Image (cartoon, rainbow, N blue to C red):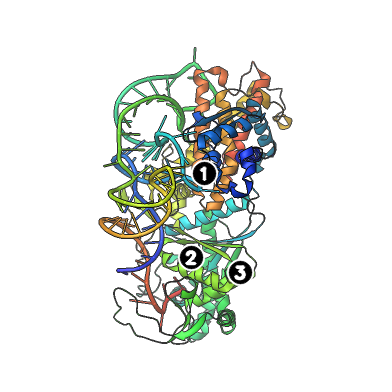
RNA sequence: GGUCCCAUAGCUCAGCAGGAUAGAGCGCAGGAUUCCUAAUCCUGAGGCCGAUGGUUCGAAUCCAUCUGGGAUCACCA
């Protein structure tokens, strides 16, 4: 066993075999092995491993694919772990692996335990995944869920694939909406002092989640703030409001099992006369990306109040953007994007090799300027990617749920988690490609059936635990803590069992592909697939009792099969951990 | 109008750096419970992969154009 990743292992073996072939040796410098793929065949009946090597190399070698495939096939037959080689279709080479190979592979899976599937793909490179980054003006609402889960799972996935990952939250605690927050909280403060504030005026946040902030302020300051001019109480109330809102948001996120390593405050960039923003803009200016000028009016419908004004602009069009972007408004204050320049520069200076922004689809228009920013700041060396999550549509009993943020009438993240459960929310959010819109129906997600894939996968894990419970009953004298599951894998030889091992063998490949493509949904689908294989095999034991995992007449075989069950349990558990959902021992 | 995302079974969606006869779940029709949790499994029907061109040995996949759906577009964060 040279590699835990079966396909990576055989890619090496196949390339080695190619090097031994005469016509390849003759033209070795002209052929590129880069396009050769080694993967599971679409149809299991074709074999265990398939390669397109002959089809890719035939042309440069001046031969036809079938003929070349026959030669390669002959070379591959020398591998003792290969039991059968066939050439099929336009020139595919299909390998069937020996039973012994699978048994050894299973043994190394068991040995690796929960670290089976870990990859060195990332080579320890530092990655920063930024997600959620909601304004601290109120509780998290359901719209934040998807980005939160996708970002969190992606970070977990990349960590497992060998990156050194920081999870980051950018707190949008600067700007006018925070002023609104503070004024709304001040009103609640007056209310807490006994004043009748009547209806919350238009333009302020009406939600009663600010009531505790008012009370806290009243308890801490008494009536003192009341007598101050706004410019004096504003910073105090702002601080308190942001702190309490962020505490609430962290709490909400925790309910979703989402955590961050770094909380980065936008306000910190504006501190000390916006020192850090100024520095960042200076840096950009120094690199020749900043000028003063005017922008053309927006295309399409011209706004009524459009005026041509001179601003300080980022010449982003030179680094791939469609239009130059304002950094300083005509009144001298900084734009939101200016803070983002400083924020990105900070990240870059912290030494990340890869920076990932998980944003909602409504920020799609922001992607190009961020990419342009990365090019300008890093001179093209920084790898910045934006992952756009399409919007989530909520349904209750098939009817769309209407939400209006202004009236304070929105479904909070907390409500969804309380009603549906953390695991179901997380898994559902991952059970769809994130570039695809998602319908989220409360009724379906709470249903504890196959309609809800998380129960299906979790149930498979619970079943593995159940097998061990059964085994303890069947063999009360066995010491399960010190049981050697590695040594008995040679007894595993049923075709269904070997197929299950083959499914487990795909895990490292899935991890790498999902991490590379930054598509955590692939893992969720794989887990479902694996669970399905496991359930199917389990049910075979009904009609064929000799296939059952636990057989009290055959102790050694039972132990061997427990090894297989254990390997399944490990992959389910490790995969579920990456998705951030629990792997229960039982689901009564 | 510009930009971005999307279009695959009746419905909801997968399809892995182009590959073999395009898959799964739900729904529909039938079946399995003296048996380790039936929260499970098995069998079947169901498709011009939105349209048209192009690239090549080969396209659901890549490119162009078009049609249809969604998002976004100013000194708002």
Q: Residues within 10 Å of mark 3 (few under 14, many from 20)?
A: many
Residue B45 left/right relative to A459: left
Q: Does label 2 lie on the same chain as label 3? A: yes
Query: Which residue position holds label 2?
Result: A134
A289 or A211, which is in the foreground?
A289
Q: Give the CA distance from mark 3 to mark 2.
A: 22 Å
Q: Give the CA distance from mark 1 to mark 3.
A: 45 Å
Q: Which mark is residue A59?
A: 1
Q: Quadrant of residue B21?
A: top left
Q: Residue at x 46, y 74 (%)?
A: A317
A139 vs A433: above or below: below
Q: Residues within 10 Å of mark 1 (few under 14, many from 20)?
A: few
Q: Give the CA distance from mark 2 to mark 1.
A: 54 Å
Point out residue A354 in the picture as x, y percentages from the top left corner: 59, 62
Parent chain of label 1? A
Query: Which residue position holds label 3?
Result: A348
Residue farthest along the right direction in this orientation: A482
Parent chain of label 3? A
B15 or A282, which is in the foreground?
B15
Secondary element under disc 1, as helix, strand or loop, is: helix
Q: Quadrant of residue A220?
A: bottom right
Parent chain of label 2? A
Q: Does label 3 lie on the same chain as label 1? A: yes
Is the C-beta separation of discs 2 and 1 under 8 Å? no
Q: Earlier in the sequence, mark 1 or mark 3?
A: 1
A270 or A64, which is in the foreground?
A64
A509 or A416, which is in the foreground?
A509
Q: Residue at x 42, y 64 (%)?
A: A364
Point out residue A6 in the picture as x, y percentages from the top left corner: 62, 38
């Amino acid at each position: 066993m040279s590699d835990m990743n079966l396909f990576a292992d055989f890619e090496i073996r196949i390339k080695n075999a190619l090097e031994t072939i005469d016509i390849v040796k003759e033209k070795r410098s002209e052929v590129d092995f880069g396009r050769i793929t080694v993967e599971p065949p679409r149809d299991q009946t074709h074999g265990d491993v398939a390669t397109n090597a002959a089809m890719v190399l035939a042309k440069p070698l001046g031969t036809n694919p079938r003929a070349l495939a026959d030669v390669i096939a002959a070379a591959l037959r020398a591998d003792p772990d290969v039991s059968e080689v066939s050439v099929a279709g336009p020139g595919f080479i299909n390998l069937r692996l020996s039973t012994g190979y699978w048994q050894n592979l299973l043994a190394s899976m068991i040995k690796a335990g929960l670290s089976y599937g870990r990859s060195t793909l990332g080579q320890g490179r530092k990655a920063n995944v930024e997600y959620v980054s909601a304004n601290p003006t109120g509780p998290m609402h359901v719209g934040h869920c998807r980005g939160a889960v996708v970002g969190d799972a992606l970070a977990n996935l990349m960590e497992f694939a060998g990156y050194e990952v920081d999870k980051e939250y950018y707190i949008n605690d600067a700007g006018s909406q925070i002023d609104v927050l503070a004024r709304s909280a001040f009103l609640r403060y007056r209310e807490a002092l006994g004043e009748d504030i009547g209806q919350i005026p238009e333009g302020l946040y009406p939600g009663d989640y600010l009531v505790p902030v008012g009370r806290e302020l009243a308890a801490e300051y008494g009536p003192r703030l009341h007598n101050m001019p706004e410019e004096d109480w504003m910073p105090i109330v702002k601080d308190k409001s942001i702190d309490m809102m962020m505490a609430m948001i962290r709490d909400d996120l925790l309910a979703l099992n989402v955590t961050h390593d770094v909380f980065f405050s936008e306000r910190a960039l504006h501190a000390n006369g916006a020192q850090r923003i100024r520095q960042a803009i200076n840096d950009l200016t120094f690199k020749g990306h900043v000028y003063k000028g005017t922008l053309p009016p927006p295309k399409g419908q011209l706004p009524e109040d459009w005026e041509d004004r001179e601003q300080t602009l980022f010449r982003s069009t030179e680094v791939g953007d469609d239009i130059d972007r304002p950094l300083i408004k005509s009144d001298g204050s900084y734009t939101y994007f200016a803070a983002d320049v400083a924020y990105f520069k900070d990240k870059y200076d912290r030494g990340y090799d890869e920076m990932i922004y998980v944003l909602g689809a409504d920020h799609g228009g922001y992607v190009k300027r961020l990419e342009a920013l990365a090019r300008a700041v890093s001179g093209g060396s920084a790898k910045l990617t934006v992952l756009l999550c399409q919007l989530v549509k909520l349904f209750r009993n098939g009817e769309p749920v209407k939400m209006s943020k202004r009236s304070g009438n929105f479904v909070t993240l907390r409500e969804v988690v309380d009603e549906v459960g953390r695991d179901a929310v997380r898994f559902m959010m991952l059970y769809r490609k994130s570039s695809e819109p998602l319908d989220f129906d409360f009724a379906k997600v709470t249903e504890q059936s196959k309609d809800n894939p998380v129960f299906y996968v979790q149930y498979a894990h619970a079943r593995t635990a159940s097998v061990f419970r059964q085994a303890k009953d069947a063999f009360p004298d066995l010491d399960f803590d010190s049981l050697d599951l590695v040594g008995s894998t040679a007894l595993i030889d049923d075709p269904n069992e070997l197929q299950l091992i083959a499914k487990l063998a795909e895990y490292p490949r899935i991890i790498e592909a999902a991490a590379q493509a930054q598509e955590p949904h692939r893992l969720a689908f794989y887990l479902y697939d694996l669970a399905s294989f496991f359930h199917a095999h389990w049910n075979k034991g009904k009609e064929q009792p000799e296939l059952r995992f636990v057989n009290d007449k055959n102790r050694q075989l039972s132990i061997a099969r427990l090894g297989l069950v254990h390997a399944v349990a490990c992959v389910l558990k490790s995969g579920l951990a990456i998705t951030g959902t629990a792997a229960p021992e039982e689901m009564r």
